[in-house]
Amino acid sequence: MKLDVLVATVRNDDITSLIKKMNIQTNAIVCNQSDTWTYSELNYGDNKIQSYTFNEKGVGLNRNNALMRSDADYCLISDDDMVFRDGYEKILEESIRNNLDADILIFNLLEKKGKRFVTKKKFNVNRLNYMRFGAARLVVKQSSIRKNGIFFNLEFGGGTRFSAGEDTLFLKECLDKKLKIVAVPEYLAELTNDRESTWFTGYNEKYFKDKGALYAAISNNKARILCLQFLIRHKNLYKNDISFSGALKSMKKGISEYRDWRF
């Protein structure tokens, strides 16, 4: 089994230090978004590290660039603020052997202050729960996504028109194409949270407008219902920053903006 770790980073001039900091122990492809165009290869231990720098913006484009250039059987999608645990390749291989019918595996991320959903027992991901997961914990079977023409949306995510949601839309398309997604309780890496978010600036008008656009992309007919359920379920997140009516107004604006652009 061939494995590539796909690393998304921005304006990083020292790829060797990045690989060391992340404790990468397998082959990897690093896609660095900056203001130049370069390519280099380096040997790190027994592993081959390919480094691409693109004068481009957008996390979805970054991840697509890495996916397109990998010839591995499986790709582990990561961000540059992750530190992999020792022996993660063996953990991953065992999980794949135990889930040979899975097209995508979703692992846990260890955090000092946990914000992300933690899988405590293996389960199949479906349309009721896929939105709780981000991209930087996915292991994808290359043949499955290529055969079905699945890539990350270029209009959603940091550096794009709509600041987040490319991972949600990726998983939705996988489900639309009948791929099997399994969440497993093992963790492969720790999230350091040592850099600022490339897209989150608070629960403000921009946040809710982009969230509305995301729900319109998920379901044009059910977008407003999705907005309402989000606002009701997560009121404690934003109640000190914006009113319910203000957040809903921004989400409706995002729905309209997406529809005007898309249709």
Image (cartoon, rainbow, N blue to C red):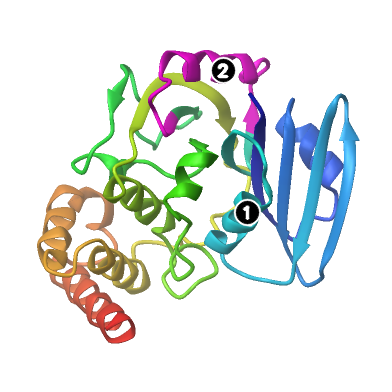
Q: Establish if 88 lies above or below 76.
A: above
Mark 2: amino acid:
Glu
Please give the range of residues in magenta: 83-106
Q: Establish if 147 lies above or below 122.
A: below
Instruction: Name the element at disc 2.
Output: helix
Question: Left or right of 173: which side holds 36?
Answer: right
Q: Quadrant of residue 62?
A: bottom right
Q: Is residue 49 visible?
A: yes
Cα separation, mark 2 vs mark 1, equals 22 Å
Query: Nearest the camera: 132 or 177?
Result: 177
Mark 1: amino acid:
Met
Magenta stretch contains residue 198: no
Question: Looking at the picture, how far across and down is residue 58, in whole percent?
Answer: 57, 66
Question: Looking at the picture, how far across and down is residue 30, in whole percent?
Answer: 73, 48
Question: Looking at the picture, how far across and down is residue 253, in whole percent?
Answer: 24, 80
Q: Are marks 2 and 1 in contact (CB under 8 Å)?
A: no
Residue denoted by label 2: 93
Identify the residue at horizontal 46%, vertical 48% (top origin): 147
Seen as rendered, the residue at the extreme bottom is 260
First-in-chain label (2 vs 1): 1
Identify the residue at horizontal 29%, vertical 71% (top origin): 213
Instruction: Name the element at disc 1.
Output: helix
Residue denoted by label 1: 68
Number of other residues with Cα within 10 Å of mark 1, as a class: few under 14, some 14 to 19, many 20 or more: few
Magenta stretch contains residue 84: yes
Question: Looking at the picture, how far across and down is residue 139, in whole percent?
Answer: 51, 34
Identify the residue at horizontal 22%, vertical 57% (top origin): 239
Query: Nearest the camera: 80 or 137?
Result: 137
Question: In the picture, which quadrant includes the N terminus?
Answer: top right
Question: In the picture, which quadrant includes the C terminus?
Answer: bottom left
